[in-house]
Image: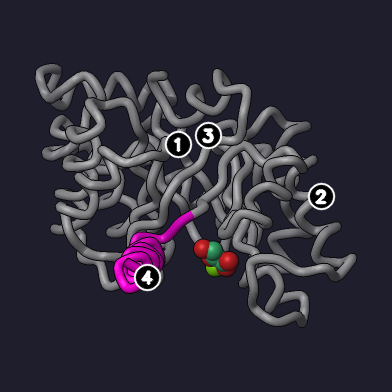
Amino acid sequence: AKSFVEKIKTSNATILGTVLTIPSPIIAQLAGLADGEFVMIDMEHAPMTIDVVTQMVSAYTTASSGAKFPLVRIPSHGVEWVKWALDSGAAGIIVPMVNDAAEMRAIVDKAIYPPSGRRSFGPLYAPFAQPDGPGSGMGGYFARAKAGEIALLPMIESKEGLQNVEEILSMPEVSGTFIGPADLRLSLGMSPAIDGTEAEFLEALDRIRTTAKKLGKVVGTMGMGEEVARKRAAEGMDFLLSTFDNGALVAGWARELAAARKG
Ligand code: 3PY
Ligand code: MG
């Protein structure tokens, strides 16, 4: 597949990915070799600077021979984050807490080249994250961007965002959405968690998913742990983040040491 969205549209099952929180190109290389179709490199809640993110995007692409998709979650809507994350050559950006159409329009301006937006040109390092290798240079990257191959994924994770979901996702430049269950729950007056049984929460997930599908957009969320992942996949989510680098390491150490002790 040439893009994250095409990957989803040509898969007949929910695609699974990993959250990368450890600021290291080595963890990105390992993720590129490991199971999973995509990663979300998290600048919002992990201590990531753009220099390491740029190297991670390239390392993940190279280790997976361009077959997997590095997404970057930026920490805010600031133009510097949008620009740096996209200029790394990321296959897409995830933008936290998009609450209404005006906020979405401002992000489109920062993320999309003219004429639909006002993104500035200069993707110096993006060629190193090109799926087919760096040979086509910045021109090759520009062609990918113009063809709409770079995903723009606003997060719906507030009561306001939920109310405005249709307007936000209707913009043609928007590829789909990534739902933040913990913040959505907080905004609805519930505890922060990735799952819950409250009718209002489940209805919110349902409303966002069905709105996205109706508009032909992709939709994903957190699907940590077997039970939640299977439930969300059965509901029809297109993509799920089902593991964390740090959590997988701790669980792997625990499992292997326990096995060694049993010896
Ligand atoms: C949330 O659950 O709020 C998220 O942002 C998930 O990453
Ligand atoms: Mg959140």
Q: Amino acid at mark 3?
A: Glu
Residue 250 in view of the camera: no
- From the image, tell me which residue sits under label 3: 173
Name which residue lies at 22% across and 37% down. Answer: 121
Closer to the camera: disc 4 or disc 1?
Answer: 4
In this picture, residue 68 sits left or right of residue 233: left
Which numbered marker is on residue 262? 4
- In the picture, the quarter occupied by the C terminus is bottom left
Asked if the beta carbon under badge 2 is closer than 8 A to the nearest atom of ligand 1, the reply is: no
Percent of width and height locating residue 150:
39, 33
* Quadrant hosting ligand 1: bottom right
Colour convention of the picture: one colour
The magenta stretch is: 243-263
The answer for how far apart the CA atoms under marks 3 and 1 are is 9 Å
User: Front-most of 136 and 6?
Assistant: 6
Residue type (three-letter) at the residue carrying disc 4: Lys
Task: From the image, state whether disc 2 or disc 4 is nearer to you.
Answer: 4
Mark 3 surroundings within 10 Å by alpha-carbon count, few (fewer than 14), some (14 through 19), many (20 or more): many
Tell whether circle 3 marks a residue whose Cβ is less than 8 angstroms from ligand 1. no
